[in-house]
Amino acid sequence: MSARKIETNGAMRQDITVESRQTRLNLSTESVVVHRNGIEFRSPAPFTPWTEMTVALQSPRDNSRLQCAGVVVACSGSKHTDYHVSMVFTSLTKQGQARLHAMAGSELGL
């Protein structure tokens, strides 16, 4: 599974795409929250806890990209109210941690 920021050719709204073998999601940046050690997002599809994922994030400040590996640690909700998915990143380099902390402090963070 992976997620990446999609270029929007100058449009104000930017999307994030989350993919796995069974699911492909286009998420608005408003539905994703970046934390110092992972991300949370709302999804119309459930994800099984302990699913390994890779995520590519793009900073809104300087457009730098960060590739992270992690696991889904929680998924709650229903198909009627959407699912709240929490993912924790693993094996971040010191440089990756610094960039993730900067993103968590930006408008993507909480």
Image (spheres, rainbow, N blue to C red):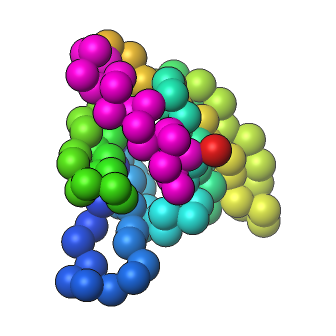
What residue do we see at 28% from left, 45% from top?
56
Residue drawn at (34%, 56%) of the image:
61
Residue 98 among magenta residues = yes
Q: Where is residue 54 shown, x and y percent of the image? A: 31, 35
Secondary structure predominantly adopted by residues drawn in magenta: helix
Vertical relation: 50 (above or below) 8? above
Asked whether 7 falls inside the magenta stretch, the response is no
Decide if residue 48 is in sight here: no
State left or right for residue 63 relative to residue 87: left
Q: Where are the magenta residues, as a range? A: 92-109
**Residue in the picture at 76% in, 54% down:** 78
The quarter in which the N terminus is drawn is: top left
Nearer-the-camera pick, 107 or 56: 107
Percent of width and height locating residue 43: 59, 57
Q: Position of residue 70 (x, y in %)?
A: 40, 25
Q: Nearer the viewer, residue 1 or 36?
A: 36
Quadrant (top left/top right/bottom left/bottom right) for the C terminus: top right
Query: In this rendering, would 86 be left or right of 52?
Result: right
